[in-house]
Image: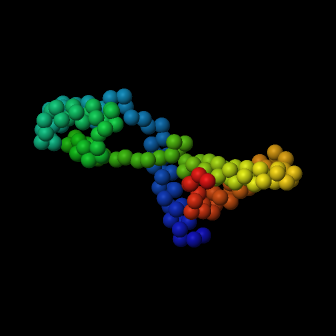
Amino acid sequence: MSVKKIVQQQYRNLVGAAAARIAGMKTPPEGWLRTVRSALGMSGADVAKAMGVTRARVTTAERAELSGSITLKSMQATAEAMGCRFVYAIIPASGDVEDLIAAQARKKAAAIVDTASKHMALENQKLPDDKIAQQVERLARELALEMPPNFWRDQ
């Protein structure tokens, strides 16, 4: 196994571990800032004082979190003012990096085999559907393993 593959596997393990830890976790309807503040029994004024800002700014931050317009810096500052640590993660929707890679490999393999199949059909050498499906699966396994430089690009 090449160094590149080993490093890539380490990244996959890191993402997989994060996904496993937060599987099923959803953002509370009120947002994390307000939820944690409420859990701590802190008022908006308490958080504002700890941050050295106005209470209105805390309210604005909580609303911005709900609308998706808050910055990471603001989330971190507010979390720290509540004695918390701000963390974020990006994880695969399915929870598994391998699912994303397999889906892309299958998509790319299907496109390649489809193109070849069309050319073969023009020469009256079209493969039966089951053979085409076998070729897609075989090529998808190869693509997922090799991950060529254009792997994530559509053809």
Q: Is 153 on the left-hand or right-hand side of 31? A: right
Query: Compared to 125, does 75 lie above or below?
Result: above
Residue 40 seen: no
The residue depicted at 26 percent of the width and 33 percent of the height is 62
Q: Tell me if I can see residue 155 in this picture.
A: yes
Q: Residue at position x 30%, y 32% from top? A: 35
Q: Is residue 5 above or below residue 105?
A: below
- The residue at 12%/42% (across/down) is 52
Give the image location of residue 9, x and y in percent. Answer: 54, 61
List the single residue furthest toward the front.
122
The answer to which image quadrant residue 2 occupies is bottom right
Between residue 131 and residue 36, name the one nearer to us: 131
Place of residue 1 in the rendered image (x, y in percent of width and height, measured from the top left): 60, 70
Expressed as whole percent of the image width and height from the top left, the position of residue 138 reads 74, 55
Quadrant of the rendered image containing residue 152 = bottom right
**Residue at (15%, 37%) from the top-left corner?**
48
Where 98 sits versus 93, above or below? below
Between 5 and 110, the residue placed more toward the observer is 110
Residue ranking furthest to the right: 124
